[in-house]
Image (cartoon, helix red, strand yellow):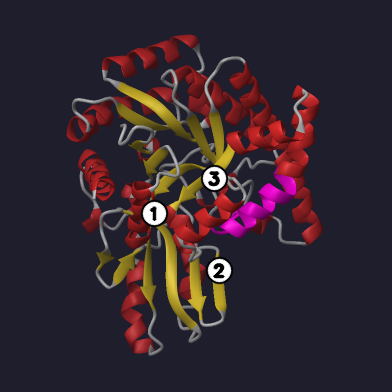
Amino acid sequence: MRVSDHSHLTYCTNIHPGENWNAHFQQLKQFIPAVKQEVSPDKPFGIGLRLSNTASLELSKEEALLEFKQWLQEHNCYVFTMNGFPYGGFHHTIVKDQVHTPDWTTAERVAYTIRLFRLLAALLPEGMEGGISTSPLTYKLWHVRCDTEREAVMENATLKVLLVVEQLVRTRRGGGPLMHLDIEPEPDGLMENSQEYLHWYLNYLLPYGVPFLQDKFGMNEEEATASIKAHVQLCYDVCHFALVYESAESVLKKLHEHGLKVGKIQISAAVKALLPAEMAARKPLIDAFREFNETTYLHQVVARKADGYIHYPDLPQALEDAANPAVEEWRSHFHVPVFIDSYGVLSSTRSDIEKVLALQRKQPFTQHMEVETYTWDVLPADLKLPMDRSISRELHWVLQQLDQ
């Protein structure tokens, strides 16, 4: 839904199961009208669409796409952003690090992403820009043997990204909409913080991309640079940047210095706690974290020490090291409801969301905002509510932050 002259707010439909189009469409039919009635009854309601590879193939069929477009029109809804990170199954299966599969070194990832952009171009309202968030190229822990291997992966993935950029430029030059690929750093991704994102952008994407576009389209250097910056942007997942202890102010300042943009804010929160040195006092906190130790998704933990950080690839590894006296704080990748500040003895990173939205309210830095709490099915029982109420409550809370 439009929340200002140029910005839109939605929630990501990866909250709803359904890995084929028919199953996912049934979920949209069930929940979207109820949520719209609650938060945007008299105005168009934007949808943040998530499609698996299978669903994207099925929706690409003319009959299915026309049916969906008609449904959107009948219910006064529109699609302006998509989540292209999870390629395969995302519910009722073990996802963990396979959420990165296939990664950006593969032709499958390129074909899937280009297909999503074709669908988005067909669905976008006239005059509106669109974005698709995607993985931070690959999972870092798959490529830890040597720097040479990691550099080769970075080069390969960058060249694959540029194949998508080529299609986005062609679409735009052909009179189509402006669309951008929004790279989403996360812990243990090949890019997990602003420093690594900038390193990739400035040392790989631009150096490889500028001559690539010059060759393909006859652009000069300035035009090619501007095209890349328009079509490849950052997905600012608030949970992910909170996990690596980065403030929004510092990230936005770095981006501004290099003329880079934020394509989308994903509004999400993690769980955290300060850990006392005394083990008896620490135990209730560790026991509370155990309640979030489920087997579907990765729940990376970044621990803060006086002299740095420890990265645990998943919550079980952190729990094994729970008695480490050097650790002063844990932050765990578990997308909890954005409106709750505490979970018993644990806290959330809700304050990071409040700070990001305050900056957006004061001086908008993106057109797209998307609530992304996808873990309702695996939350502890006392945090579960009916799905439409849960979604509506989150959107209302975000609207309150933006209206202050």
Q: Is residue 192 above or below residue 306?
A: above
Q: Nearer the viewer, residue 185 or 42?
A: 42
The earlier-in-sequence mark between 1 and 3 is 3
The quarter of the image holding the N terminus is top left
**Mark 2 vs mark 1, CA separation in Å:** 24 Å
Mark 3 lies on a secondary structure that is: strand
Mark 2 lies on a secondary structure that is: strand
To which residue does mark 3 refer? 234
To which residue does mark 2 refer? 311
Would you call the spot at circle 3 few (<14 residues within 10 Å), some (14-19), or many (20 or more)?
many
Is residue 156 one of those drawn in magenta? no
User: Residue drawn at (51%, 85%), measured in percent from left and top?
Assistant: 326
**In the shown orientation, is residue 208 left or right of residue 28?**
right
Disc 1 residue type (three-letter) = Val
Part of the protein shown in magenta: 187-205
Residue 192 appears in the picture as rendered: no
Residue 398 appears in the picture as rendered: yes
User: Residue drawn at (31%, 70%), measured in percent from left and top?
Assistant: 346
The earlier-in-sequence mark between 3 and 2 is 3
Q: Is residue 205 above or below residue 176?
A: below
To which residue does mark 1 refer? 356
Would you call the spot at circle 1 few (<14 residues within 10 Å), some (14-19), or many (20 or more)?
many
